[in-house]
């Protein structure tokens, strides 16, 4: 029987039509609770034909272990920085993904973090829950400048919501959509240094690459406005953990709202977990009932199409042909 490994927890924990779609294939589904480290992934991939993954660490060694039985990897989501894409392509393994399904949800979560920081939300809810009535004065978003690094689908949705709040929006992206920017009043900046210097709020929506790793670090933080708020719904490794912790303690960074960390789940002594001006959510920016069903349905549809030799909805390495497996 065809065997499929399924590791993404939001897929498994959220009801919806994606369960029926996968069950209807008649394939044997092997379930694990991801994200998996390399050792756990290695232990599971030796006898599977297809793989619906989340943020599991899929290294070259994992792919070597999975060969030749594994025929398709279907990523639930869009980030493939934990997957050795080069090795997938070298081994002729189609790597599928699901763009365009979670941008609304992640943009909403970005504003959840921003508003929570700027309005001292957790301080106030903690106070009232404890029977107190302590108050801190917050700030309006109106006429503040938000700098968006990465103006793809998610970045654009953040820009739309920022304009609705009456904010000034500036953006940096190598691939600039001038039509969108003109239509929605987004000013393009030429360099990252320019966006660092101008932003009251810095919102990160770029992929993790060698160029973006530690993009926010001591050197770049020094170029930012004192008290800047930084929002990260992209990847934890884009922000240097020790540097952001130090900047939060010194007040150079006024607040950090992040849905992602460099280690997930974090150790109990992770330096960002106890800072009062840091809000960490457990990588649930795209985890809504609506978004999960969209992502999971797309991931299953991709897998089914590829396993039958049909063109998937989206493929990271389209130069690798899909071949009929079942």
Image (cartoon, rainbow, N blue to C red):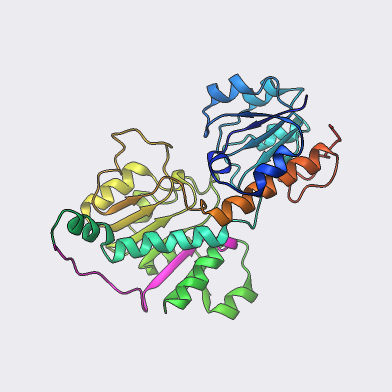
Q: Position of residue 306 (x, y in %)?
A: 80, 40
> Does residue 203 appear left or right of residue 294 in this picture?
left
Between 172 and 270, the one lying in front of the other is: 270
Q: Is residue 215 above or below residue 120?
A: above
Residue at 52% in and 53% down? 286
In magenta stretch: residue 145: yes
Q: Is residue 235 above or below residue 163?
A: above
Q: Position of residue 206 (x, y in %)?
A: 53, 54
Residue 150 visible to the viewer: no
Between 243 and 3, the one lying in front of the other is: 3
> Does residue 243 appear left or right of residue 173 in this picture?
left
Q: Is residue 48 above or below residue 86?
A: above
Q: Main secondary structure of the magenta part?
A: loop
Q: Range of the magenta residues?
A: 133-153
The C terminus - image quarter:
top right
Indicate the quadrant where residue 122 lies. Answer: bottom left
In magenta stretch: residue 235: no
The N terminus - image quarter:
top right
Between 268 and 22, the one lying in front of the other is: 22
Residue 249 visible to the viewer: yes
């Amino acid at each position: 029987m065809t065997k499929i490994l399924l590791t993404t927890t939001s897929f498994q924990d959220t009801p919806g039509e994606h369960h029926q779609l996968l069950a209807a294939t008649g394939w044997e589904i092997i379930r694990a609770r991801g994200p998996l480290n390399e050792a756990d992934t290695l232990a599971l991939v030796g006898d599977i034909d297809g793989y619906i993954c989340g943020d599991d660490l899929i290294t070259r060694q994992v792919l070597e272990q999975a060969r030749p039985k594994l025929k398709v990897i279907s990523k639930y989501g869009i980030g493939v920085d934990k997957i050795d894409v080069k090795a997938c392509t070298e081994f002729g393994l189609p790597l599928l993904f699901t763009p365009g399904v979670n941008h609304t949800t992640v943009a909403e979560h970005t504003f959840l973090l921003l508003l929570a920081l700027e309005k001292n939300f957790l301080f106030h809810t903690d106070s009232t829950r404890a029977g107190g009535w302590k108050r801190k004065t917050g700030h309006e978003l109106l006429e503040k400048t938000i700098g968006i690094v990465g103006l793809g689908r998610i970045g654009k949705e953040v820009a739309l919501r920022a304009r609705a709040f009456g904010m000034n929006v500036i953006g940096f992206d190598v691939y600039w959509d001038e039509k969108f920017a003109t239509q929605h009043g987004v000013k393009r900046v030429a360099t990252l240094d320019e966006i660092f210097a101008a932003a009251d709020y810095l919102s990160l929506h770029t992929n993790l690459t060698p160029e973006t790793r530690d993009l926010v670090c001591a050197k770049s933080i020094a170029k930012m406005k004192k008290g800047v708020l930084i929002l990260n719904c992209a990847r934890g490794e884009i922000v240097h953990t020790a540097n952001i912790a130090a900047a939060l303690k010194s007040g150079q960074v006024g607040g950090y709202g992040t849905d992602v960390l460099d280690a997930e789940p974090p150790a109990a002594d992770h330096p960002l977990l106890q800072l009062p001006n840091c809000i960490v959510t457990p990588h649930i920016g795209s985890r809504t009932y609506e978004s999960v069903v969209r992502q999971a349905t797309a991931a299953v549809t991709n897998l089914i199409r590829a396993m039958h030799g049909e063109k998937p909805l989206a493929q990271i390495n389209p130069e690798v042909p899909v071949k009929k497996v079942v």
